[in-house]
Amino acid sequence: MAYSDLREWVAALERAGELKRVKAEVDPVLEITEITDRVSKAGRSEPNNSGGVAGMKPGGPALMFENVKGHPGAKVLINQFGSEARMKLALEVDKLEEISGRIHQLMNMKSPEGFLEKVKMLPMLADMGKFFPKTVNTGPCKEVIKKENASLLDLPALKCWPQDAGRFITLPCVITRDPKTGKRNVGMYRMQIYDAKQAGMHWQRQKVAAEHYRDMLRAGAGGDAKSRSAAVDIMARSSGGSVLAEGERPKGKLEVAVVIGTDPALTFSAIVPAPPEVEEFIIAGFLRQKPVELVKCETVDLEVPANAEIVLEGYVNLDELRTEGPFGDHTGFYSLADEYPVFHLTCITHRKDPIYATTIVGKPPMEDAYMGKAVERIFLPLMKLTLPEIVDVNLPVEGVFHNLMIVSIKKSYPGHARKVMSGIWALGQAMFTKCVVVVDEDVNVQDLADVTLKVFNHIDPERDIQFTMGPVDSLDHASRLPNYGSKMGIDATRKWASEGFTRPWPDEIRMDEETKAKVDSIWRSLGIE
């Protein structure tokens, strides 16, 4: 049975022995980060600044801090997704591939031909109806309602790293509505708390909520294409684009709801690279096989999960940017300060004794590494839908999601690897991948030792490495310009005569099966072990 809310999920963690409650007083400024970083790096033999905790299984346990300095009675949950076992428990599967199998089944549904086939599809269609959210009159998130006395400073938000610009909300489900279609989006964007009523909204350019903001800017600018383009560039002052003069900026606001503390399927849905046309509430329903119940907000025209722990209601102005950051990011480095929209708080609703869910990011592996690997496994079928020649992909944790993708393919024609590189760079958020390495289907991309052996044996660097220019992740501090730089593709497949390679290609060294079986049979008698 799917978890209805965060509290059911916490109870499941406790039953599974995956949660530790911390009773000692701990400061949300730096101390919770240091503790969690040590726990999340448990099981790692290599040295790191914090030092992993010896004797713990990889990822350590989820942590519930129950004595948070400066916030009497507050409870802070962190590292809830910080292991492969917890990711599977969160999504209620024995293997993450079970979900990708369900996605594959959905994608391969064919139009029924004839009455009998239509009848056979009815149960499946009825199941699909369970995925869609439903609106209810009220819910636990309305147990306490604060308007005039609402304050962001009441949240036990963390200052994660020493050079962070302040305290940040790091695990919010941010809800906006497409101004053109009315469809809702749930995304996860960090928020720097400025004061009781204002926070920075870190909408990177490629995010759906940022596109909602740009659509309103375009509409508000009116006039010709040049004016609309200049209005959109308000979000990119640091990239050197033109900006409308002070008196010409479009007025208006985009309503926003920020949800903190949801059931695990919904929190996970906020980070998945879903098409903009598909609401994350539907994805959450699909993952949990049960609809998300929504309730209307108090001060904005949006709906939020009825069972959420905390809801922040408010808006961003279209004519206002403010410096946000720096922030210790998942790259292992600080993302630099930049200009972003400002969230203005109008109301807070929450459950009685709410649980504040948060996370930290930094040098991998941390909690987000396990979430990212789950996305990789679950959404491989969607990637194959566009690039069916793909056999498997691996985004190594140390590649921080956008620096390295290793892809194995069924090579069918000359230049096939280069076609796949171009396809990946045209594929949603995969367009930010800095380095794409393409190997043959017999290479295990999950085995980095095998990949290293095959790649560096198979390439002639001048022939097999190509460079291209395009958009890069906003967190890439090495690119020549913000959001724009170069990418590298490596064709490490076997080269064919039709690709201009006329030399013989050697076989890989392997022992014959007969000899291996013979040695297996005499192994114990050798006295080696």
Image: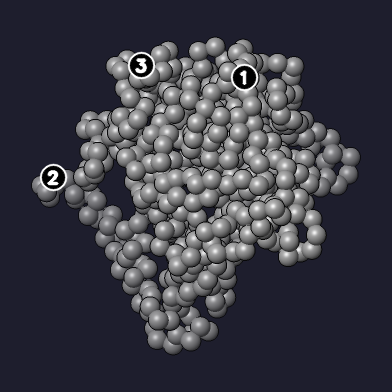
Residue 355, image x, y percentages: 48, 20
Q: What residue is shown with label 3?
A: 67
Position of the N terminus by quadrant:
top right
Label 3 element class: loop
Q: Is residue 112 depicted above or below 266 in this figure?
A: below
Label 1 element class: loop
Q: Amino acid at mark 2?
A: Glu
- Answer few, some or many: residues within 10 Å of disc 1's Cα (few below 14, many 20 plus, some between 14 and 19): few
Residue 268, image x, y percentages: 54, 36
Considering every residue shown, the one lying at the far front of the view is 247
Residue 211, image x, y percentages: 66, 50
Residue 446 in view (yes/no): no
Reading the chain from its start, which is encountered first: label 3 or label 2?
Answer: 3
Reading the chain from its start, which is encountered first: label 2 or label 1?
Answer: 1
Q: CA distance from mark 3 to mark 2?
A: 52 Å
Q: Is residue 48 depicted above or below 403 in this figure?
A: above
Mark nearest the camera among 2 and 1 is: 1
